[in-house]
Amino acid sequence: MSRLTRVPGVLYGGDYNPEQWPEDVWSEDAELMREAGVTMVTVGVFSWARLQPGPDTWDFAWFDRLLDLLHAHGIAVDLATATASPPAWLVRAHPGILPVTADGVRLEFGSRQHYCPSSPEYRAAAVRLTRALAERYAHHPALALWHIHNEYGDHVTECFCARSADHFRAWLTDRYGTIDGLNHAWGTAFWSQRYGTYDEIEPPRTAPGPVNPTQLLDWRRFCSDALLECHRAEREALRELSPDIPATTNFMSMFKALDYWKWAEHEDFVSDDAYPDPADPRAHVNASLNYDLMRSLKGGRPWLLLEQAPSAVSWRPVNVPKKPGLQRLWSLQALARGADGIMYFQWRASRAGAEKYHSALLPHRGTASRGWRETVRFGAELARLGEVTGATTRADVAIVLDWDSWWALEVDDHPCARMRWPDLLRPWYAALHARAVTADFVPPRADLDGYRAVLAPSLHLLRPENAERIAAYVHGGGHLVCGPFSGVVDGHDHIHDGGAPGPLRDVLGVSVDEFWPIPDGEAVRLDSGAEATWWSEWIEPDAPDTEVVDSYASGQLTGRPAVTRRPYGAGTAWYVSAHLGEGIAAVLDDVLRAAGVRPVLDVPEGVEATVRSGTQGTYLFVLNHSDHDTRTQLTGPYADGGTDLLTGAAVRDHIDLRPLGAAVLRIATDSLGETDQ
Ligand code: GLA
């Protein structure tokens, strides 16, 4: 697979905000970047006010000098379109740019991301700036990548102003045509909510009680689309004026407000900003989940970790630094999961502003600091890993992720407010992670054929056509595991005829008679010893061959089925009617065994193992996230070991790792034998 940019090797660098420094500091920066092995920096993210000090005043001279200086030092540039923070003059000239909350409060200038996605003035000004930058720098030799905007949806994901309302109405008209279509979709026969014309519709502003759930669902869809329109307008300008340079925008991991399946279609490659919390001992599992998602968003294409913190962030209530070695390990983790570049926020620590306590590659203390030593050491290590770039990962397991379903799941007035997509997903993912089983994420419309097992921890909203695809996959020999509260509503958030699991009833061979949420602080036992919290269901196996795998052993559902399995065509479908937390692991063990899914290696607790394969070789990553020494046996296709690219040493039989240690083995090709790696 081709490189992300024309810059060879693993991209290494970070956000660089030179406008915060006198120019004599820039040359020191460029020298130090070279010393650290930095290959690319992101510039211009918050430079709008400096680049365009007034409506018709432009100041590119300083930026010319900056790009020339970086180029002279061999540092490539990821050039931001600088549109995430409109300058004061623009906001004062067009106060309608400022976003409005659901309560009608206009958010003031003085922070960042203060714009209404539907504001024509904002959009026009953003495209104008993007064009000006592209016209000037499209052919600059330092330019390697366009960085569109910055973290769409950060701080402000929605605006409730009058213009957003107009835009929402237009979006709804496109979607539904006649007002009758909308009335049906929104179920407005309920609570006298019928609309006579589109003009009567408003965004779901703060209202006396629960707002129409389909109105809310459409609002979420609209807000994601409205920001995507902003993004596409900049993307189009770049495509026209700078067609040879790739473009990306930095995603924010598994972010609820934006349907990244849709967004990723407009990226040359996916990039991500990831801020796992060093205070959270399970942070690496969640990070791994996010990285698998990033890898999956463009069908396995390598992605770019565009921002992470070298040590502490500044925006948590308590900002714990990364202990020595942790940023290295977590960076290698991103590489292990498909990243081709490791970048940071930010290069030089700010002395003023809201992020002055945020860590940087070059900390306040300068080159005497521990942080700087790690920056230099890691740059040298990354330089040895260039051959890994372009290599991809094969997964036997797919996890279905659907933003529509996520949004529909998390509206008010549901049987149990604890049912949140990330909380439902995490224990399923953690079980795979602990077993070193690699998973892709897929949208519900995906072609599932290449996967041995498909996991759907929550498919609350399920369109019949997607259910058909899932059923066909099982019929053809696939293994499906479906979590609770799934197949409940259709694309309009209407309950499926006959109730849950709706269009999956046949394949699963069960009907849900009644949802049976579990009060906070209580748990319900299952025969297997697993415990359910938050959620259980009264289910009826209604196919003759539905087998009860586990039953409720305490509470009001005692004796009733909790987990079922049904042969369907050449495959098998499991239904898990309760939120089992970590208890899902035992169910998944059964499924993985039945589906013939094998781990990369049998790993000790706290060790992560993944594989990337490319034209230059197969690379086995083994990472020790624990606080003790570990030994991992090399077995199967990796039995003969290989060369550790980090040390150059030959490794056979097993890998011993110190706490936070890592190995990246280029596997001897002979040992790959019959495998399809
Ligand atoms: C985000 C932003 C950066 C910076 C960092 C701080 O990722 O994109 O501008 O604010 O957070 O962690």
Image: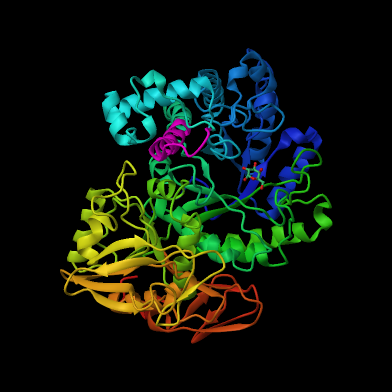
Q: Residue drawn 54% across and 53% down? A: 341
Q: In this view, does 342 lie to the left or right of 639?
A: right
Q: Position of residue 349 (x, y in %)?
A: 76, 46
Nearer to the camera, 336 or 210: 210
Horizontal side of residue 44 vs 27, given as left or right? left
Quadrant including the C terminus: bottom left
x, y percent for residue 665: 50, 73
Would residue 280 be found to the left or right of residue 263 on screen? right
Residue 603 position, x and y percent, is 49, 80
* Quadrant location of the N terminus in the rendered image: bottom left
The number of callouts visible is 0
Q: Is 618 placed above or below 601 here?
A: above
Q: Quadrant of ligand 1?
A: top right
Viewed as shown, does residue 482 lie left or right of 208? Answer: left
| Residue at the limit of the structure toward the bottom, as seen here | 653
Q: Nearer the viewer, residue 188 or 640?
A: 188
Decide: is 375 above or below 81: below
Task: Examine the rendered structure and indicate whether residue 307 appears above or below residue 434.
Answer: above
- Way the structure is coloured: rainbow
- Between 560 and 423, which is closer to the camera in this rendering? 560
Position of residue 301 measured from the top left corner of the image (x, y, whole percent): 40, 53
The residue at the point 70 percent across, 52 percent down is 316
Name the main secondary structure of what is drawn in magenta.
helix
**Closest to the observer: 413 or 470?**
413
208 in magenta: yes
Residue 457 visible (yes or no): yes
The residues colored magenta run: 207-228
Q: Which quadrant of the view contains residue 482?
A: bottom left
Q: Is residue 2 visible?
A: no
Asked whether residue 275 is drawn in magenta, I would say: no
